[in-house]
Image (cartoon, helix red, strand yellow):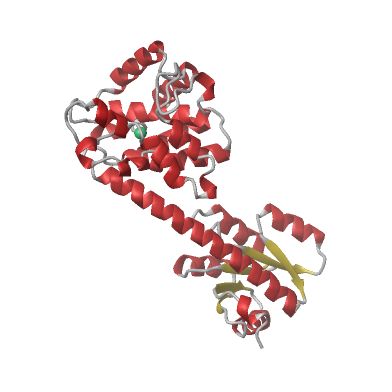
Amino acid sequence: MLLHPKAVPTGTILVADDQAPNRELLEELLTTQGFTVITASNGAEALDQLRQSSVDLVILDVMMPHMNGFEVCREIKANPDTYLIPVVLVTALSDKQDRIEGLRANADDFLTRPVDRVELLVRVQSLIKLKQRTDELERAESVLFALARSIEGKDPYTGGHCERLAEYSASLGQHLGLTDEQITALRRAGVVHDIGKIAVPDSIILKPASLTPEEWKLMREHPVVGERICAPLKSFRLVLPIIRHHHDKFDGSGYPDGLRGENIPVTARVLQIVDVYDALTTVRPYKPAFSITDALQTMKLEVAKGWWDAQIFDQFEQLVRTSTADFLARGAAAGGVGI
Ligand SMILES: [Fe+2]
């Protein structure tokens, strides 16, 4: 009989154990509860299975030859394709040292041998539910990223702008010593910062001539519209201020809020510097791509005018000048937007 039949989630569980009787026991317990189970008899095979199948949860025996459960767990958690999959380690009864090492390997939960049937199912169900919520969140993010890229795709001059911005701003954020959370937000904002342009007619976005005051008014709404589009996503909490303020200027002359100086979030000040740099070093309908030197010179003049954060610009210039030749120069072959 199923435990709590209404609440039982489905999913695929990978069980890795070098002892066949242990694998079979877990497989039987889990399949009778409606899960699909795949098995591996060692660590390398488990990692292979993860590459080939879509797995919702991994149960790893700690004591396996060649590659033990901790090592497999570390690999799973270090790989961007698999790190969100929950991992349960099966350890000897009350082995404290194993648990400490398991936590260091970023395991999500532990089971002790002999495995208690009820405990196993409760833990598995709760972790699978968590994984399904994470999947939903990932799908929502993917929709936003796809929308942002489709807006970018409308303009022949913008090829690769979002990806470059995500990469550049994360590099500058790292160089400035920002937190991992802020750097993740910068990567996301690099892709979605102009998503609000969905509300701006193509005739304005693609207009080769100067915009009329009325058209400018519409264009200047894109940061606020973008913030509104992304607001429901809790994981975008730190991305929202970057979207909203990426056109505010250090001297208060920007939009939408006319914020000044350090009132503009540091992440937005980082993104706007790489946004401007990318626009300058790429071809536009009204100008060729600037060389790196000319782009930096132009930006220096804009810093002197009070537009950009001088300290962040200095760090950015240092990063550009000390980076490998292709870094931040690749964009020169493609287009970019800095409106
Ligand atoms: Fe923008």
Quarter of the rendering containing residue 155: top left
324 or 29: nearer the viewer:
29
216 or 207: nearer the viewer:
216
Residue 20 x, y percent position in the rendering: 64, 81
- Quadrant in which the N terminus appears: bottom right
- Quadrant in which the C terminus appears: top left
Q: Residue at x 54, y 43 (%)?
A: 237
Split into quadrants, the picture shows ligand 1 in the one at top left
Q: Look at the picture and state if 89 lies above or below 119.
A: above
Residue 162 x, y percent position in the rendering: 35, 40
Q: Residue at x 59, y 83 (%)?
A: 31
Can you name the residue that lies furthest to the bottom here?
1
Left or right, 113 with reference to 45: right
Residue 240 x, y percent position in the rendering: 49, 39
Q: Look at the picture and state if 310 lies above or below 37.
A: above
Q: Look at the picture and state if 138 lies above or below 190.
A: below
Residue 45 x, y percent position in the rendering: 53, 70
Quarter of the rendering containing residue 243: top left
